[in-house]
Every structure is written in C-alpha cells, then in structure tokens.
Image (cartoon, grey):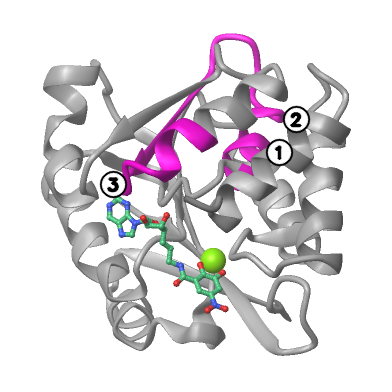
Amino acid sequence: MDQSKEQRILNSVSYNAVKGDPESVLDCIDKYCSQKEWAMNVGDEKGLILDNVVKEADPTTALELGTYCGYSAIRIARLLKPKAHLFSIEFNPEFVPIAKEIIEIAGLSDKVTILEGHAQDIIPQLKSKYDVDTLDFVFLDHWKERYAPDTILLEECGLLRKGSILLADNIIYPGAPEFLEYIRNHKRFECTNYPSHLEYMKVEDAMEKAVYLG
Ligand SMILES: O=C(NC/C=C/[C@H]1O[C@@H](n2cnc3cncnc32)[C@H](O)[C@@H]1O)c1cc([N+](=O)[O-])cc(O)c1O
Ligand SMILES: [Mg+2]
C-alpha cells in the first residue's frame, strides 16, 4: 500500500533533520510542506505567534488539541522550562505513531505526552488520570467546530484558572465562527486577535488569544 502524506513527512524528517535538534525538525517540515506537499501544520509564520504566546504564558502544564504530525507540539515543547510538560490529544491512530516518532527525532519525548482519543473524552480525565491540576496554556488546532464545546468542557472540568491562556489557530481559514462568537461574548475571557496567513499560503488567516479571567 503506498505511503500516506504524513508518512512521507516523517520520512523527510527522519532523513534530513538533525537528531535532537527541534529547530532542524521544524525547518525540515516547513521546507517539505512549502515545496513538496502542503499539510496543516501551524507553520513558520503563525508559529512565531505561537512561540510568543507560549513565552508569555511560560506554562508549567500545557495542553494541545490536535497533534497531527507533532509540528506545533515541538514548537511548544522546545520552549518549556525544565519541569514543564505538554499533553497533546490526537484521535487519529495513523497520526499518533508518526507524531511520536517526529517528536522523538526532535529530542522532546520527555516533554510531551500524546494522549490518543477524542478531546471530549480525555479532557474530563486530565485531573484524575493524568494528575493535572490546572492548565496554564491551551493550543486549539483540532476540528474547528470542536473549539467552542471543548473550551466549555475545559472550564466545566475546572481546568482553567485565573490567567490561563488559550490560543486558537485558523480563526479566518478554515474559520471557527462559533468559537469566535462564544469566546468574544463570554465575559470571563479577554481576547486578542493576531492577523497572519494560512500556513505556506498567501491566504489570510488569524489566531485568537483568550485569557481566562477566573
Ligand atoms: O482542519 C484543520 N485542522 C483540523 C485538525 C485536525 C487534527 O486534529 C485531530 N482531531 C480533530 N478533532 C479531534 C478531537 N480530539 C482529538 N483529536 C482531534 C485530527 O485527527 C487531526 O490530526 C485545518 C485545516 C486547514 N486548512 O487550510 O484547510 C488549516 C489548518 O491550520 C487546520 O488546522
Ligand atoms: Mg491549524
């Protein structure tokens, strides 16, 4: 059976990236996906916005919804302080081993735990099963219509604290209108919009930061 695009991305990283060097893994994926096959990684332009928000949050416990190939997990984990940890939730069984391998090549396996399953099933288990207290940073990059319900779920599960920072990808393209409506009209979130472009394209996109006010 011929390989998937995600397997070809892993092959490219495995062949071209410097083992243990997150930057070289990111550069390799960005090069492959801008020159060979487009893929839905947050990319280098929006990646810089992600970097800056992660630096601002300086999280001890971070959560990502939608691991895909692990590109943004590497962007986040490479900035985490020594004892900090990233949990990344992914339900597609084909992507999980590929993301694990790419994160391993980046040398960040100790900083990232990939939880296989649906976010709506795993979020309620974070406290009891994964010993999470509250989340300092959450990156939303999974199915766009799940952004709002899963944000509500995070709040209901007591996983947000005063100052928790959420960052959502794809506010313009493909768009997350329900999420935008919810988060901007919810009085306990302080929102900031970051205009940018769709990964590897000239298409307009944006990210939205939402700080939980407690
Ligand atoms: O559709 C997009 N992203 C959806 C991302 C989906 C990823 O998150 C997982 N997932 C989904 N619900 C889940 C629930 N629980 C766990 N994993 C889940 C999917 O298995 C996939 O790995 C997208 C599309 C474009 N685009 O240009 O078309 C650009 C982007 O930047 C995008 O992020
Ligand atoms: Mg995205």
Residue 33 x/y as whole percent: 76, 62
**In which quarter of the view is residue 145 placed?**
bottom left
Residue 199 x/y as whole percent: 71, 71
Residue at 52% x, 36% y is 98
Mark 3 or 2: in front is: 2
Q: Secondary structure beneath disc 1? A: helix
Task: Decide: few, some or many residues near mark 1? Use Cα within 10 Å; few <14, some 14-19, many ≥20.
Answer: some
Which residue does the numbered mark 3 point to in the structure image?
Answer: 91
Left or right position of 183 against 201: left
Task: Decide: few, some or many residues near mark 3? Use Cα within 10 Å; few <14, some 14-19, many ≥20.
Answer: some
Which residue does the numbered mark 2 point to in the structure image?
Answer: 14
Question: In terms of sequence position, does the residue under pointer 3 or pointer 2 come before the other?
Answer: 2
Dot 3 beta carbon under 8 Å from ligand 1: yes
**In which quarter of the view is residue 75 placed?**
top right
Under mark 3, the amino acid is: Phe
Q: Are marks 2 and 1 in contact (CB under 8 Å)?
A: yes
Task: State the extent of the magenta-drawn residues as a range.
Answer: 71-98
Per the image, is 16 magenta?
no
Q: CA distance from mark 2 to mark 1?
A: 5 Å
Residue sitting nearer the eye, 67 or 124: 67
Under mark 1, the amino acid is: Asn
Question: In terms of sequence position, does the residue under pointer 1 or pointer 3 come before the other?
Answer: 1
Residue at 86% x, 56% y is 31
Which residue does the numbered mark 1 point to in the structure image?
Answer: 11
